[in-house]
Amino acid sequence: MTNLMRIYRSQERTMKRFAESSKWALRRKHTWFSIVFHPPGDFMSSGKRLILLLVLLLNSSVVCALFVGTEQRIPFLNPSLASSLVGFVFSYPVPFVMGMLFYNPMPPSFIVKIDRGSGDTFMSYLLLCFSLCSGE
């Protein structure tokens, strides 16, 4: 099986390559689609993907159940923001632990070095500032 992403990234950008890259990303990384449509030969089988999805759903359900009928009181935050912060702290580590359980390093022949210019950094800061300013 050839590494299509390596081929696409090493050539000039076109709409066709963008569409193929988007399809590949959906097949590999989308939480729901990748269970059924993952590429053949992928180390993450449908069973592993389903386990990860069920753990994420269970994690979200447990964190939501913890907050039913409660009000979080953190001195410098209003109650809704305090509940969001506590929920984030409880639910944040679970996906990373599950990801470490199923981690498989990428073969060195598939690694593509991409020369990223300063535009990526600028856009990251711009989006971060925009999201902070547009929050309620």
Image: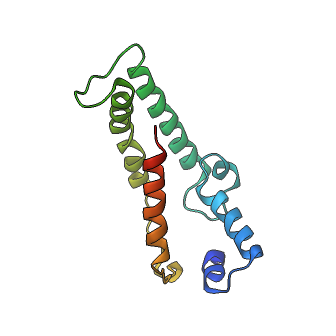
* Farthest top residue in view: 69
Using residue 3 as the reference point, say whether residue 106 is left or right of it.
Answer: left
The color scheme shown is: rainbow
Front-lying residue, 23 or 74 = 74
Frontmost residue, 86 versus 106: 86
Instruction: Assign the N terminus to one quadrant of the image.
Output: bottom right
* Residue 12 figure quarter: bottom right
Can you give x and y, in whole percent of width and height, for residue 38 in the image?
66, 57
Q: Horizontal placement of 43 versus 33: left or right?
A: left
Which residue is the extreme one toward the right?
16
- What is the x, y in percent for residue 72? 31, 22
Which of the 4 quarters of the picture holds residue 77? top left
The x and y percentages for residue 4 are 66, 76
Seen at 73% across and 79% down, the residue is 14
Above-or-below relation of 120 to 53? below
Residue furthest left as drawn: 75
Q: Residue at x 61, y 59 (%)?
A: 28
Residue 103 vertical position relative to residue 59 in the rendered view, above or below: below
25 over 15 or under it: above or below = above
Image-quadrant location for residue 2: bottom right
Q: Is residue 51 left or right of residue 13?
A: left
- Residue 25 lies, with reference to residue 95, above or below; the image says below
Identity of the residue drawn at 43% across and 68% down: 105
State the residue at coordinates (27%, 22%).
73
Count up the numbered dots: 0
